[in-house]
């Protein structure tokens, strides 16, 4: 099933269309439930992918792959009420795999690891654009897994327990890795003029 065919999304307005109800119905093969899941979570998936890869064109192939995997792996969802975190985990996993593929392609000369907007942005947005560019230059130096942890914790501002859940790591491991990641990024941000104002904020839970 191609998610490109799911427009407009099915929305019944029925209060019974909770995550749990939608997950159970989709697992039973209800295409209308799949449409409702797409309609409910498409913006979340698109936002995660955009924040993972940075400014530039949308990444429809990555978003589509994420939803295809969600529907394919619904039987692995132990708690149907936890559909949202399930989708976040799969989306970040797909993004990590894509980042690794792009890095390999860049190493062998088949493309760039990241895409950046070519059109100039004037006025007050110039500063914001440079800040984003500087941030994603730093993120581009991280491993795919560290980049995923950064997006989940510092951009999406997920709780540590949620970060651990979607990355299938223990809470102690996530605490240790996120703390090291925050320290490392703070050090690297000191050499990026556009990011100097954010130095120290990672330790507070995220960039504001």
Image (cartoon, rainbow, N blue to C red):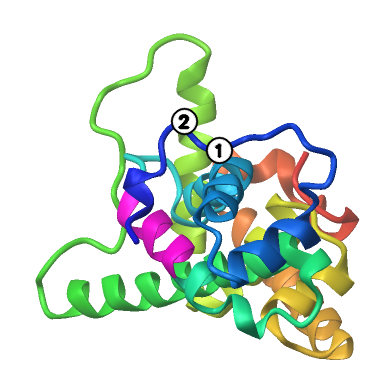
Picture coordinates of residue 133, whole percent (x, y) = 44, 43
Neighbour tally class for label 1: few under 14, some 14-19, many 20 plus, Cα within 10 Å: some
Given residues 194 and 71, the one toward you in this image is 71
Check disc 2 and report its element: helix, strand or loop: helix
Quarter of the image that includes the N terminus: bottom left
Q: Which residue is at 30% across, 21% downward?
A: 120
Give left or right: position of 162 versus 152. right
Q: Bin the neighbour count of mark 2 within 10 Å (Cα to Cα): few under 14, some 14-19, many 20 and up.
A: some
Q: Is residue 8 left or right of residue 159?
A: left
Q: Which mark is residue 129?
A: 2
Residue plotted at (86% across, 60% down)? 203
Measured as percent of width and height from the top left, residue 161 is found at: 88, 73
Relative image position of residue 5 (x, y in whole percent)? 33, 45
Is residue 57 within the magenta segment?
no
Residues rendered magenta in the picture: 60-68
Q: 20 or 117: nearer the eye?
A: 20
Residue 18 is situated, as x and y percent measured from the top left of the image, at 80, 51
Q: Is residue 143 left or right of residue 77?
A: left
- One can see residue 150 in this view: no
Q: Is residue 30 above or below residue 27?
A: above
Q: Which residue is mark 1?
A: 10
> Is 62 included in the stretch rendered in magenta?
yes
- Residue pushed farthest top? 123
Residue 157 can be seen in this image: yes
> Relative to 105, does residue 155 appear above or below in the rendering?
above
On screen, residue 121 versus residue 171, left or right, reads: left
| Disc 2 from disc 1: Cα separation | 36 Å
Identify the mark nearer the N-term, 2 or 1: 1
Q: Is there a contact, CB below 8 Å, between mark 2 and mark 1?
A: no
């Amino acid at each position: 099933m191609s998610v490109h065919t799911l427009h407009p999304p099915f929305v019944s307005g029925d209060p019974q269309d909770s995550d749990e109800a939608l997950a159970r119905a989709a697992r039973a093969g209800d295409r209308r439930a799949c449409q409702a899941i797409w309609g409910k979570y498409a913006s979340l998936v698109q936002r995660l992918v955009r924040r993972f890869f940075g400014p530039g064109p949308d990444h429809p192939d990555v978003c589509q792959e994420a939803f295809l995997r969600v529907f394919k792996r619904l039987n692995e969802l132990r708690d149907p009420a936890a559909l949202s975190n399930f989708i976040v985990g799969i989306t970040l996993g797909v993004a990590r795999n894509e980042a690794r593929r792009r890095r390999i392609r860049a190493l062998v000369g088949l493309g760039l690891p990241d895409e950046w907007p070519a059109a100039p942005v004037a006025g007050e947005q110039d500063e914001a654009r440079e800040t984003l560019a500087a941030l994603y230059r730093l993120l581009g130096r991280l491993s795919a897994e560290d980049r995923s942890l950064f997006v989940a914790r510092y951009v999406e501002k997920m709780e540590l327990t949620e970060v651990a859940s979607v990355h299938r790591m223990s809470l102690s491991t996530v605490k240790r890795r996120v703390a090291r990641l925050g320290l490392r990024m703070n050090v690297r941000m000191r050499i990026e003029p556009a990011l100097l104002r954010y130095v120290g904020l990672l330790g507070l839970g995220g960039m504001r």
